[in-house]
Amino acid sequence: MNSLLKKSIWVFHLNTGSCNACDIEILDALTPFHDAERFGVKLVGSPRHADVILLTGPITIETLPKVINAIEAAPRPRIIVALGSCGVGGGIWHDTYSTIGGVRSLKKILDEKGIQVDGIYYVPGCPIRPEALLYAIALIKGLVSKKVKGEIKYAE
Amino acid sequence: MSKLLKPVKLVVIAGEAGRVTRKYPFEEPLVTPDFRGKIEINASKCIGCGACVNACPPNALQLIEDKEKLVLRYFIGRCIFCWRCIDVCPTGAIKGTREFELATDDISDLYTHVVHSRKACASCGNTYATEKIIRYVAEHASLSEEYLDKCPDCRKRNFIKALSRRRSGFE
């Protein structure tokens, strides 16, 4: 469980140049069928009200200054949840000229500017299933345990 | 009057529809049999040929070469779950799963490494291919066995030497 997010998680949906598939899945997770509001998740219209920023897309050069402004506007403690293959590692756009390639490059840029981020969660998927987002929220809430683990295998 | 009764009507409709919300983290997710999730690499079958690396559209599978080792790295955070690697794998080492619950707070959880050792050339000593791919080739093409323990450069050099010996009689 994340010690910084003990109360209801209010999320701000930040599209940084994604193809809208992950965005549709976020909205799907908020509908009564999956109902993320069971965990206190509320979609807010301004980063100033948000605890968590749901970041989709590979962060294009065009959106980068706006993304930095939005993240700076969120109050501390601020958590970023990077959604989809694009958000986590740049996805299929990881080495193109017009994107910076995911949240890890963004973290470096934010560190250079002195904007602190208190935690980053990674949710891979292309696009993410609504359940994957609910799983990430449950992980933040401490309801489920982490399933994926890094491995080093030796081919004898 | 109808304005006052509106909530009552809504309650009636909601009662007829019943509960639609899934209890997801506390019950099984709705995953169809043809859903594509994360891949799993069987290290004992993998030969390190790099066919999956060529097929991977977002370079989620990468080969990292060293003098001694060759590492196949799978980064889930960039994978688009197209399963092309499964189609091209010559030994069937890559298997698809329905796993999609991949959320984590640590990026190192998303990496899988498969470490291969590379074989040194018998004549010059440089490493040139993984030991398992050489074994695989020996199984499938028995005629090539006498060249297998030499690197491609040494093979070329030996061929030219043999050719010149045949033509002129001396090296």
Image (spheres, rainbow, N blue to C red):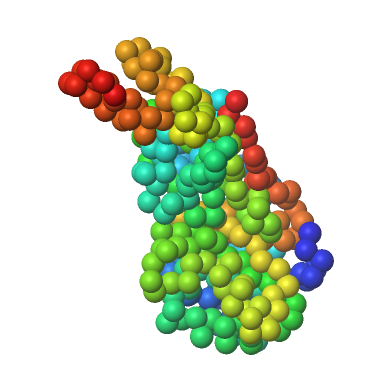
Classify residue B53 as left or right of residue B24.
left
* Residue A153 seen by the camera: yes
**Residue at image point 42% right, 43% down:** B53
Q: Is residue B166 above or below residue B93?
A: above
**Left or right placement of residue A69 versus residue A59 in this view:** right
Number of labels in the image equals 0
Give the camera-side residue of B156 and A43. Answer: B156
Q: Residue B104 is drawn in which quadrant?
A: bottom right
* B58 displayed left or right of B104: left
Is residue B109 positioned above or below B41 on the image? below
Which of B134/A36 is in front? B134
Residue A104, quarter of picture: bottom right
Q: Which residue lies most toward the left here?
A: B167
Q: Nearer the viewer, residue B14 or B170?
A: B170
- The quadrant of the image that shows the C terminus of chain A is top right
Residue B123 image position (x, y, % from top left): 46, 26
Residue at the image position 69 percent from the left and 59 percent from the top: B105
How far across and how far down the image is residue B113, in percent? 59, 42
Q: Nearer the viewer, residue B18 or B89?
A: B89
Q: Position of residue B33 (x, y in %)?
A: 46, 36
One can see residue B94 in this view: no
**Residue at the location (49% across, 81% down)?**
A64
Residue A56, above or below A139: below
